[in-house]
Image (spheres, helix red, strand yellow):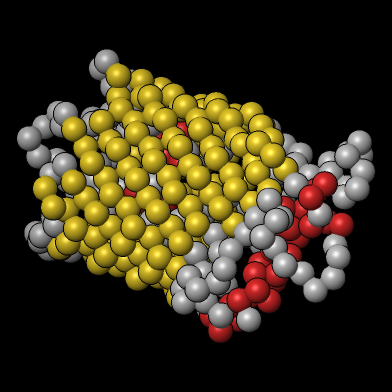
Amino acid sequence: MKNSVLGIIVCVCCIQLAHAQQDSQYSQYMYNTLSINPGYAGSREVFSLVGLHRSQWVGIDGGPATQTLSAHTPIGYGNIGLGVNIMNDNIGPATEQYLDIAGSYTIQFNYKSKLSFGLKAGGHLLNVDYSDVSTQMEDPALSEEAEVDNRFAPQVGIGFYYFTDKFYAGLSSPNLLKTRHFQEAGDLSSSSVAAERLHYYFIAGSVFDLTSDVKFKPTILTKAVAGSPLQIDVSANFLLYDSLTLGAAYRLDAAATALVGFQFVDSMYVGFAYDIDTTDLQEYSGGSFEVMFRYELFKRYDKMVTPRFF
């Protein structure tokens, strides 16, 4: 059964790569914003380090697994931000590594509101190894000749990020370059048949004080890419006593998510997310989970005036 499911996943992976390459998705996107928007660099006004691991479709061989590590900080008087993002992504026979550096410039409209413009540049390595894939028939698309070995592609991204102490909104495209990956099986001289499409992200959220000890933050993330349905994530999080975060999220036509996080000290936050599939895949999958941490140094103030849990 697992080999059969793996075959399904591989086929889905290849079809998806051939028609509309999709970037990795995150349920805790509100804490991992630098990975999709370079304008976020330096916006927290501290040195911020974020690590995240996501295992998708637990129990299915070849299911996606993603690890990210990012760091960003303001420079000088805070108008300039600098960040770096590293990602490793695995799905079926494909492995991808990303490394990019982001820079941002912030314009302050008044005491609370700011707008950041960000650029990022980096590279992407792709490997595809079909040696562990078992099929019922010989398929030239899964042959050794069709494998990819450390294929490099440059990446350039752009982003805008507006924020106050209780609201944020961002618009970005992490990669403006259209990169071709695969060639017709058996004809290595032919033109590529799969390409990464442009992805467009819109993210927004706000914080509301329900009581002196309870704060509420709704968020939304939309991702648009040619050839794929519009992806919409909505979430609602509650911050209790500036320490415990409880929430829920829904990804349209895909999954429902439970979220929990804890601020151990001012500098350390740990979060966990568990997705339940709402598609037919739930018959085979044990769901998906994420674990993330955020560590921050060199705060400008002894304590943040408002909970910047974004």
Q: Residue at x 50, y 45 (%)?
A: 88
* Residue at the top extreme, as displayed: 76
Quadrant of residue 61 within the rendered picture = bottom right
Residue 183 image position (x, y, % from top left): 84, 44
Instruction: Answer left or right for 178 relative to 108.
Output: right
Task: Say which of 142 and 204 sits in front.
Answer: 142
Q: Nearer the viewer, residue 202 or 198?
A: 198
Residue 199 location (% of width, % of height):
62, 45
The residue sitting at 79% across, 50% down in the picture is 144
**Whole-percent x and y of residue 83?**
39, 29
Note whether residue 73 is visible: yes
Residue sitting at x 62%, y 59%: 92
Residue 28 to residue 81: above or below? below
Asked whether 22 or 232 is in front, the reply is 22
Does 18 appear above or below 43?
A: below
- Judge from the rendering whether residue 84 lies leftward or rightward of residue 120; answer left or right: left
Left/right placement of residue 160 relative to residue 134 reads left
